[in-house]
Image (cartoon, grey):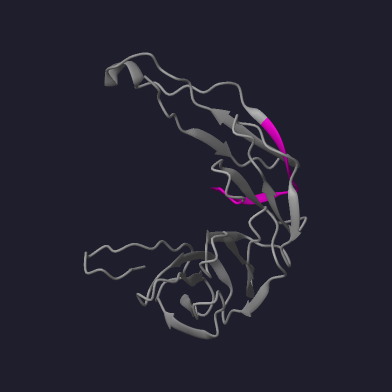
Amino acid sequence: MKFNWLDLIRNCFRPGRRKVGRRVRYSGEHLEARQLLTMLAPVSVAAGTTPTEVEIRDFNGDGINDIAELNSSASTLSILLGNGDGTFQSPIDTSSGGRGSTMAVTDFNHDGYLDVAVNHATKIDVFHGRGDGSFDLPSVYFVGATANDIEVGDFNGDGYDDIVTASFSYGGTTEYYQNDGFGHFPTHHNSSIGPTGLHVEIGDVDGDGYEDL
């Protein structure tokens, strides 16, 4: 019997390194035999300077998960293509346009390649993927308030993911960027959320078929 065990990616602030741990395959068949979580020895992967966020996706379409790494001090977005055995190739670096803090990954324009939206303090950079771990030059959208977090979801039901950010300035605001279907965001709205906004998550919490924040 084959088990598909999840692995763990851990952010490290030791300059330029990331720890990758792999989960032990347990032989027990009962829950009691699998209660204690243990990990194999971590594999260190060079991942740039001061990593602030990581995403696990298949950026080159080979069916193997890759690492997307946002490096604040180096102002880079790095893609580490996976080899399929828990190891990764050297990073493919793209300038992130500044000291990015958070990012979100989706296919904004439905071309079959994953794109990345990087959140900065005063702007959002949207990088359209080329399907090989590299990206086109970003489209830049300036935010009305200092953005703290970023997420993507289809808020108007047109089948294309939009962008929302949570902001902690001006008493807390939510910024909404509507996708035009081509991966661009010309329509922008904001609304007050009352308390200072720190993080944002998306999901249909009331079962009405519409995304909530």
Which residue is outermost to the top?
A: 27
Out of 135 and 26, give the one closest to the viewer: 135
111 relative to 36, above or below? below
Our reading of the magenta stretch's main secondary structure is strand
* Magenta-tinted stretch: 44-59
105 vs 32: above or below: below
Q: Residue at x 41, y 61 (%)?
A: 201
How many numbered badges does the structure rendering display?
0
Is 117 magenta? The answer is: no
Left or right: 16, with 197 as reference point: right
Give the percent coordinates (x, y) of residue 178: 47, 79
Furthest toward the left, the residue is 207
Q: Quadrant of residue 19?
A: top right
| Residue 103 in the image, given as x and y percentages of width and height | 58, 60
**The C terminus: image quadrant:** bottom left
| Residue 68 showing in the rendered view | yes
Question: Where residue 199 sits: x, y (%)?
Answer: 47, 62
Q: Quadrant of residue 184?
A: bottom right
Q: Is residue 154 left or right of residue 133?
A: left
The quarter of the picture where the N terminus appears is: top left
The picture places residue 25, in percent across and down from the top left corner, at 44, 20
From the viewer's perspective, is 19 left or right of 203?
right
- Closest to the observer, 120 or 67: 67
Residue at 44 percent of width and 29 percent of height:
5
- Left or right relative to 52: residue 194: left
Query: With respect to residue 144, does 168 lie above or below?
Result: above
Q: Quadrant of residue 130?
A: bottom right
Q: Residue at x 64, y 75 (%)?
A: 123
Q: Choose between 157 and 48: the one closer to the eye.
A: 157
Q: Is residue 56 above or below residue 110?
A: above
Residue 171 visible in the snapshot:
no
